Image (cartoon, grey):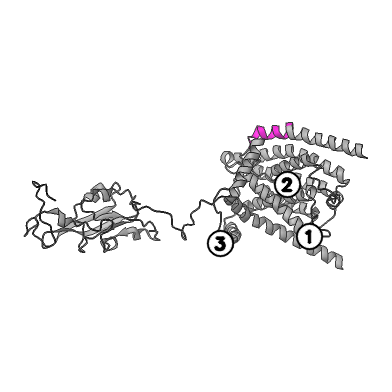
Amino acid sequence: MFSLLKGIWTVLKHSIRKRETVLYPEEKPLRYPRWRGRIILSRDPDGSERCVACYLCAAACPVDCISLQATQDKQGRRYPEFFRINFSRCIFCGFCEEACPTYAIQLTNDFEMGEYYRHNFVYEKEHLLISGPGKYPDYNFYRVAGISIGEKNKGESENEKPPVDIHSLMP
Amino acid sequence: MGEPIRSIIILIAVLVGVLAIAAGLIWLERRMLGLWQDRYGPNRAGPFGSLQVAADMIKIFTKEDWIPPFADKPVFVIAPAIIVVTTLLSFAIIPFAPGIEIVNLNIGLLFFLAMSSLSVYSVALAGWASDNKYSLLGGLRAAAQMLGYEVFMGLSLVGVVMLAGSFSLREIVEAQRKVWFVIPQFLGFVIFLIAGLAETRRIPFDLPEAENELVAGYHTEYSGMKFGMFFVGEYIGVTLISALIATLFFGGWLGPLLPPLLWMMIKTFFFICGFILVRASLPRLRYDQLLSFGWKLMLPLSLLNIVVTGAIILAAS
């Protein structure tokens, strides 16, 4: 009997507590930088696409929502001919981001992706590609890669750093 | 000429007022439950979500009004009306302020007890007519619960009647000019409060509709406005019991400064919030606990209350 009254009193004390609800559309919930939201494709600092169409993201994807087709430009540089993510299947696990060797595919903070038609969830490359470098502003895959493609050797292309001398301790 | 028109105006005002309060309680209850559970409740439609009531109304009126083919059709249709009619009829005897009441019956309190006993037919018949085992269990539970709690609900009021010397609610209020009956009749007040909770079939006495055992108890098969009627009936019942507690134990319209009608409304509102608070905090009782609590504890206590009150009145006179 006494415990019932104590329970009622405890509930009554809650009338002056702060409410826990986050009033969503007006007040956004707190999201941290590593939040896994809408997937984007980023560009190098010099503006070219980072994606080298290696298919690792598509292979890593547990729900097979990524599909792409690799092709090459005149220099022999690989890039995706099309790049398609079906967001109605995507589970935002972030495996594609972990698999990506060039930091091209990244997950962002955006989660407000509601659509009225299911086919609108299929994002093509022009919807995915952003104009900036995303989370890694200074990273440029081809400047640190040091691979030879077609008509040039390691470190010879413009904006490419010379290959690292692995026998030297100097930076 | 003047008198009939006046009583018709009061009649319509009470009817509209009570139904409006019952509708408003849907919103109020959800807001208050939200407050006590650290959330907001409905807050989108209109200021503080108060137009939620309109949204709920539109929704419930446009729902399919489905009568199951296996149901006992006439009884199934009549059952939800009984609860609304009986609880609304009980409002006829409540004096809201001096002169603002529908009838001043000299057996007012008995009339209320009769009407609240009739309202159990609604639940029992709804459970029976649905021809569904869960509904039937709910209806049976309601019948047994009413049988147990109606008895000491009546007995708990005997003390008040002895002190006031009348069954008329107006005279009971007038008898509280010196001191509210909650002080000499505190035990009676507590017993009536518990009986009132059981009477409205709300948590912790909502065994007839226990969601997690009986689907929805007696209104499992109901939909649309028939289902809405049970809820309107429940909310009118809450208002009725609150108004009665205010009238019988807290001096009704009596109070300083403010107009009598406002005092009555403040007191009623206070007890309505109390009902919601109890719902927000207490768990549901087990069925055997409920019945043994009623018959073995509350009934002897209310009898004791009568004996002690009678002895004191005798000694004083």
| Residue located farthest toward the front when viewing the structure as drawn | A170
For label 2, count other residues whose C-alpha is less than 10 Å away and answer few (under 14), some (14-19) or many (20+).
many
| Residue that numbered label 1 is attached to | B257
For label 3, count other residues whose C-alpha is less than 10 Å away and answer few (under 14), some (14-19) or many (20+).
few
Q: What residue type is labelled 2?
A: Ser
* Residue at image coords 60%, 41%: B210
How much space separates mark 1 and mark 2, taking CA atoms? 38 Å
SS category of the residue bearing label 3 = loop
Chain of the residue that carries numbered disc 1 in the rendered image: B
Q: Is residue A98 above or below residue A76?
A: above
Question: In the shown orientation, is residue B247 left or right of residue B81?
Answer: right
Viewer-side residue, B273 vs A6:
A6
| Residue that numbered label 2 is attached to | B119
Q: Which amino acid does label 1 sit on?
A: Leu
Tell me which secondary structure the magenta stretch mostly adopts.
helix
Q: Could you say where residue B315 lies in the image, as x and y percent from the top left?
A: 91, 36
Q: Residue B10 carries which label?
A: none
Q: Residue B45 carries which label?
A: 3
SS category of the residue bearing label 2 = helix
Q: In which quarter of the image is the N terminus of chain A?
A: top right
Viewer-side residue, B258 vs B236:
B258
The magenta segment is: B285-296
The stretch drawn in magenta includes residue B182: no
Residue A80 appears in the picture as rendered: yes
- Which numbered mark, 1 or 3, is in the foreground of this view? 1
* Residue at image coords 85%, 47%: B167
